[in-house]
Image (cartoon, rainbow, N blue to C red):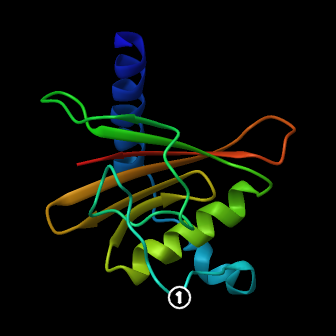
Amino acid sequence: MKKFLYITMVLVISLSFVACGSKTTTDASKTSKAATTTPAKITYTKDLAYLPTYNGVKSAKYTAKTKKTLATSKYTLKNTTDVKVFNDYQAILKKDGWTITGATKSTTIFAKKGTHIANIIVQKMGKDKDVILMISSK
């Protein structure tokens, strides 16, 4: 369990450094509006009540926030693509009033709303049509 927390913490810190040093990227949601579908009503996660869910999925794994780490939720999304999840979730966050502070096309989204931050990682699962959505937030 401690290894998972350390790996998550190193990943979040590494992504933060990469995002701070990267150039501004093109907003992927603007380039493929036709493929983007957002739900009419925004629902929120059970574990992170301030954060909108991705199309109402349930958390597969949740780790609560500690003094040294962010709260993390991990979801497995079946029969979809990383590009679709990235574009849809970015649109959901914007619709809910989140500010996208950084993004790496189809892989990471950094967002902020009030005192909350969210680091979202979207990752393909091998050759399957499944996607992992991992969110670190406070």
Which x, y percent locates residue 80?
77, 58
- Secondary structure beneath dot 1 equals loop
> Which of the 4 quarters of the picture holds residue 116?
bottom left
Which x, y percent locates residue 45?
38, 58
Q: Is residue 15 left or right of residue 56?
A: left
Q: Is residue 84 left or right of residue 27?
A: right
In this rendering, the answer to whether 95 lies above or below 52 is: below
The residue nearer to you, when weighing 109 against 42, is: 42
In this rendering, the answer to whether 85 lies above or below 93 is: above
> Which of the 4 quarters of the picture holds residue 8?
top left
Which x, y percent locates residue 107?
59, 51
Q: How many marks?
A: 1
The residue nearer to you, when weighing 106 against 44, is: 44
Residue carrying label 1:
40
Furthest toward the right, the residue is 127
> Which of the 4 quarters of the picture holds residue 46?
bottom left
The residue drawn where x is 74% and y is 86% is 34
Q: Say what amino acid the circle numbered 1 marks.
A: Ala
The residue nearer to you, when weighing 23 against 6, is: 6
The residue drawn where x is 48% and y is 75% is 92
Which x, y percent locates residue 70?
26, 38
Q: Is residue 131 left or right of residue 7?
A: right
In this rendering, the answer to whether 4 lies above or below 117 is: above
The residue drawn where x is 85% and y is 41% is 128
> Which quadrant of the figure contains the N terminus?
top left
Please rate how many residues cluster around mark 1, counting C-alpha atoms within 10 Å: few if below 14, some from 14 to 19, many from 20: few
